[in-house]
Image: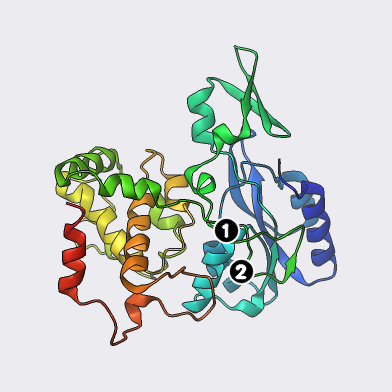
Amino acid sequence: MQEITREALVAKASELIEKGVVDRMLGWKKGEFSYDVTPGVFTSMDEVNKDFIWDDFCGANFSKYLLKETAKTEKKVLVFLKPCDTYSFNQLLTEHRFDREKVYAVGIPCNGMADPKKLKELVDGVSSVDFEGDKVVAHTLFDGDKELACADLLPDRCVHCKSKKHVAYDELLGSDGEVLDSGRFDEVEKLEKMTPDERFAFWQGELSRCIRCNACRDVCPACTCEKCVFDNPNSGVENKAAANSFEEKMFHIIRAFHVAGRCTDCGECSRVCPQHIPLHLLNRKFIKDIDAFYGDYQAGEEVGSRAPLVNYTQGDLEPSEAVERGNHHE
């Protein structure tokens, strides 16, 4: 269960829309099923009252959506931001991707989201879901009600939540938290302890399921190029399924390099992947190595902060030393 209620968010939206402070709102929209929640744009209170939803399935990070929505209006856009979302928000501001003056950001606390994928793995034929304290009651089409613990449905990004603290907002509803020591690199360390052949087999197995739907790229707050290299018709790999195992790996490895030092570890890539590929682990490996090589750095913690990869100092690691350290994991 979330600390803030839907009614509180609707009341805040009503106040800001009626006063003319904002003329549209980014929020979560109910889908065909209660666990089928999608991002939506609301331009009137009629739409908000009808379709807006707020519950444990509202995991989408709206930061990237601000790029297009702020360009459509001269007024402000209302956006609700969970703590982890605010890091993406700040990182996009650092990269001058939208006008801060055209956003009214309301910070909302988060007790962790629920992963629809895990729900469907644990229970068949789910028609609707109710949250009751730390329990989830899944109503099924043919097998009665099933009770689960909320903790059983937490996605990895919430199990290893990096922060309950908002780093950006105009107004905060509810309480604020602290930066957490979440053990988010534990899974990366397990991969590092594998032999090179074991790691290769692991990623070959995971990436072989990729269907090149581009969902990870399209949702990623760090992927905001006006023309993506993978949309270049001269690249030979434009919007296509992989022709061989090399192409399977190339797309994701290139994307991971492109967002290195800018990824805030929001986990959106894994959340939207229809093939359940743990793409966030690639990005966490880069984050872990950057921390080890250049000192602790959290992308998006402050607006204007320079990532280590674009901030040369005389004390930077030499390439040979980086290779030597990397060899310790083989």
Q: How many marks?
A: 2
In this view, 263 is above or below 74: above
Compared to 244, does 168 lie above or below?
A: below
Task: Specify few, some or many for label 2: CA neighbours under 10 Å numbering under 14, 14-19, or 20 or more.
Answer: many
Q: Is residue 1 left or right of residue 39?
A: right
Going by the numbered disc 2, the residue's amino acid type is Val
Is residue 228 visible in the rendered structure shown here?
Answer: no
Q: Check if mark 1's residue and mark 2's residue have beta carbons within 8 Å.
A: yes
Residue 265 shows in the view:
yes
Separation of marks 1 and 2 at Cα, in angstroms: 10 Å
- Residue 329 in the image, given as x and y percentages of width and height: 21, 53
What colour scheme has been applied to the protein in the rendered image?
Answer: rainbow
Q: Which image quarter is the N terminus in?
A: top right
Frontmost residue, 111 versus 123: 111
Q: Is residue 142 above or below residue 138?
A: above
Q: Which residue is mark 2?
A: 167
As drawn, the residue found furthest toward the top would be 143
Q: Is residue 150 above or below residue 302?
A: above
Q: Amino acid at mark 1?
A: Ser
Give how far across and how far down residue 68 sits, in percent: 54, 67
Q: Quadrant of residue 295?
A: bottom left
Q: Residue at x 42, y 47 (%)?
A: 270
- In the image, taking residue 227 as reference, residue 196 lies left or right, namely left
Residue that sits furthest to the bottom in the current view: 314
Q: What mark, if any, has residue 163 been given in the picture?
A: 1
The secondary structure type at the circle numbered 1 is loop
Residue 250, by quadrant, is bottom left
Mark 2 lies on a secondary structure that is loop
At 68% from the left and 42% from the top, the residue drawn is: 55
Horizontal and vertical percent position of residue 314: 28, 87
Label of residue 97 in the image: none
